[in-house]
């Protein structure tokens, strides 16, 4: 099979159901596809059942780790064990975990492409289990801090490797839905943490009321590790490591076809060609390549991915996810048990709206959801600040309703997209680096927000929520002008969007480049700019 035939077959098989066909460009040619309807049904089943099951369990673990300490900080037995920590120490207890996450994400930059997705996840689960055991057996702050950092290292590794594994293994049609489903399960983990803390809060005589919730995270880590053992490696990573036969076997397994099937070979050859071109475009040092804005537009793409993580944290989501019971008690004045119940109900609401966004993320696209989510979250934070600042009758009810409204908009966009976008926007050769930088950005700002929130709530009151509302409002022009829509595109098509705009010397917008890539009957030649002047003129004429 020639290179051109491979590209055409690959496009027919992977893209045709995701993209409309322009009448100006003719129709796609087709390869004979045996048992088509049966194959498509099996593809969907296999796509949903391979790395996804493992990812969902880990996301439950990640959410559980996020939510568990918010309810423990007000537990009397926990407080007595650690000498009644003040707000500063409480912030350090919670944020130390996220400091470990920062280090884990940085480490993944160096080991992610060496170990592969599966081994990196298994290492992360091992660290999570060890860290959970150290925390659950703590009798002093130093041991607790060590356990938090070790567990954070594991989470930092996993939250870099798992989205990449998922994005590299899923079809473009399902990618957004599946990553969003992961984040819904993340919220489910927070729900488990809140209600477990609530149930054990009635145990007032034994330290099991806080030690068991901390130890329970080990269960999810061990289960995730066990599932990874029986799941296949990312085919794109295998090709990156020049292991094409293994990649073909994985692709064949995903599509329930023999490894020798023409469609399997077309997919593998298409990915291999894309990876080879990206490697050829590299200027040698991966650090230098990070800041290079040539054909692959690496620096721009890394910044776009990391920007979503930055926006998620500066929108204040971890004030709600980590400290909601504390905020309900200290900012609004509710009782301990009622705060735990409302925190759990709020996360159930977030689960619902996150699940609802599964229907929208590939239909509406990433940008519209980011814009809607940011605007709604900003308005909600302003409402919280207004309710707390005036202190009128029933202001606590208004603030609580505004917190629930905040999660409606958070669930629609900024919940999942900051984990999906960095993994899909970066090229294959920069995907591990880009995801690592994005995850490091996320955890660094989580650490800052979680560290200062107890002091912010205590000292600034309503002004703390007002500040985050203003931050969130400033995201809107950046999203509108700089972000590139990726919905409905495969990873290789996303590369083509950036290459097309670069090769036409910025004569067209990214939106125009995206439409051209979707409508084109075959992938653009990647080797040079030859003939692109004519292509540029054709594009201008059509537009």
Image (cartoon, grey):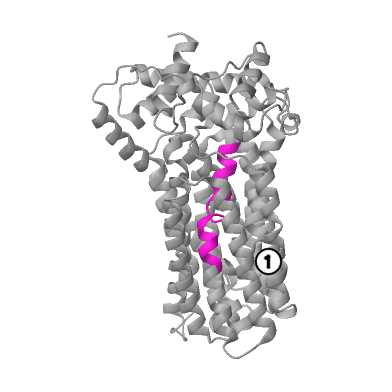
Q: Is residue 149 visible?
A: yes
Depth check, front residue: 487 or 258:
487
Query: How many labels sit on residues?
Result: 1
Local secondary structure at mark 1: helix
Q: Nearer the viewer, residue 202 or 52?
A: 52
Query: Which residue is the extreme one toward the bottom?
Result: 393
Residue 40 horizontal side relative to residue 380, left or right: left
Splitting the image into 4 quarters, where does residue 45 fall?
top left
Report the span colored magenta.
Answer: 406-426
236, above or below 343, in the image: above
Question: Where residue 55 appears, x then y in whole percent?
Answer: 44, 48
- According to the picture, the residue beneath numbered tag 1 turns out to be 469
Across and down, in percent, residue 379 comes to 62, 67
Q: Is residue 185 visible?
A: no
Query: Residue 488, how many percent across, how many down?
Result: 48, 37
For the C terminus, the quadrant is top right
* Residue that extends furthest to the top in the rendered view of this protein: 2
**Is 368 contained in the magenta span?**
no
Image height of 145 relative to 241, above or below = below
Image quarter hosting the N terminus: top left
Image location (x, y in percent) of residue 318: 61, 64
Judged left or right of residue 226, residue 439 is right
């Amino acid at each position: 099979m020639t290179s051109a035939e491979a590209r055409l077959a690959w496009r027919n098989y992977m893209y045709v159901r995701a993209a409309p066909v322009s009448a100006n460009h003719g129709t796609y040619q087709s390869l004979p596809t045996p048992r088509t309807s049966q194959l498509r049904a099996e593809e969907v089943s296999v796509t949903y059942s391979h790395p996804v099951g493992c990812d969902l369990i880990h996301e439950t673990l990640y959410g559980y780790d996020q939510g568990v300490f918010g309810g423990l900080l007000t537990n009397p037995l926990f407080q007595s064990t650690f000498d009644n920590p003040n707000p500063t120490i409480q912030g350090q207890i919670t944020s130390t975990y996220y400091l470990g996450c920062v280090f884990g994400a940085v480490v993944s930059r160096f080991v992610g492409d060496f170990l592969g997705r599966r081994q990196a996840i298994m290492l992360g689960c091992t660290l999570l289990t060890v860290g959970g055991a150290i925390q659950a057996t703590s009798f002093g702050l130093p041991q607790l801090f060590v356990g938090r950092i070790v567990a954070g290292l594991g989470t930092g590794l996993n939250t870099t490797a798992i989205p990449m594994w998922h994005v590299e293994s899923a079809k473009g049609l399902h990618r957004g839905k599946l990553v969003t489903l992961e984040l819904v399960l993340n919220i489910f983990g927070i729900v488990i943490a809140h209600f477990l803390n609530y149930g054990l809060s009635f145990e007032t005589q034994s330290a099991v009321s806080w030690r068991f919730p901390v130890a329970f995270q080990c269960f999810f880590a061990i289960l995730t590790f066990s599932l990874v053992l029986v799941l296949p490696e990312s085919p794109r990573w295998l090709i990156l490591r020049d292991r094409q036969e293994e990649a073909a076997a994985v692709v064949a397994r995903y599509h329930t076809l023999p490894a020798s099937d023409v469609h399997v070979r077309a997919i593998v050859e298409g990915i291999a060609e894309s990876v080879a071109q990206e490697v050829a475009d590299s200027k040698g040092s991966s650090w230098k390549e990070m800041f290079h804005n040539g054909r692959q537009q690496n620096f721009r793409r890394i910044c776009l991915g990391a920007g979503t993580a930055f926006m998620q944290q500066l929108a204040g989501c971890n004030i709600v996810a980590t400290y909601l019971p504390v905020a309900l008690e200290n900012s609004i004045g509710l009782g301990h048990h009622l705060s735990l119940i409302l925190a759990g109900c709020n996360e159930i609401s977030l689960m619902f709206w996150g699940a609802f966004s599964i229907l929208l993320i590939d239909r509406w696209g990433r940008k519209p959801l980011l814009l809607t989510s940011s605007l709604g979250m900003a308005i909600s934070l302003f409402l919280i600040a207004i309710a707390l600042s005036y202190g009128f009758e029933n202001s606590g009810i208004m603030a609580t309703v505004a917190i629930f409204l905040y999660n409606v908009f958070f669930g629609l966009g900024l919940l999942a997209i900051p984990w999906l976008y960095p993994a899909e926007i970066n090229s294959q050769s920069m995907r591990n680096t880009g995801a690592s930088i994005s995850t490091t950005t996320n955890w660094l700002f989580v650490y800052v927000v979680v560290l200062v929130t107890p002091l912010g709530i205590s000292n600034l009151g309503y002004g703390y929520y007002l500040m985050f509302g203003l931050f969130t409002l400033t995201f809107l022009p950046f999203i509108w002008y700089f972000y590139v829509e990726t919905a409905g595109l495969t990873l290789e098509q996303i590369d083509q969007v950036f290459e097309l705009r670069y090769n036409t010397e910025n004569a067209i917008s990214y939106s125009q480049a995206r439409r051209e890539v979707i409508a084109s009957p075959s992938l653009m030649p990647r080797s040079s700019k030859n003939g692109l002047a004519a292509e540029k003129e054709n594009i201008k004429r059509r537009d």
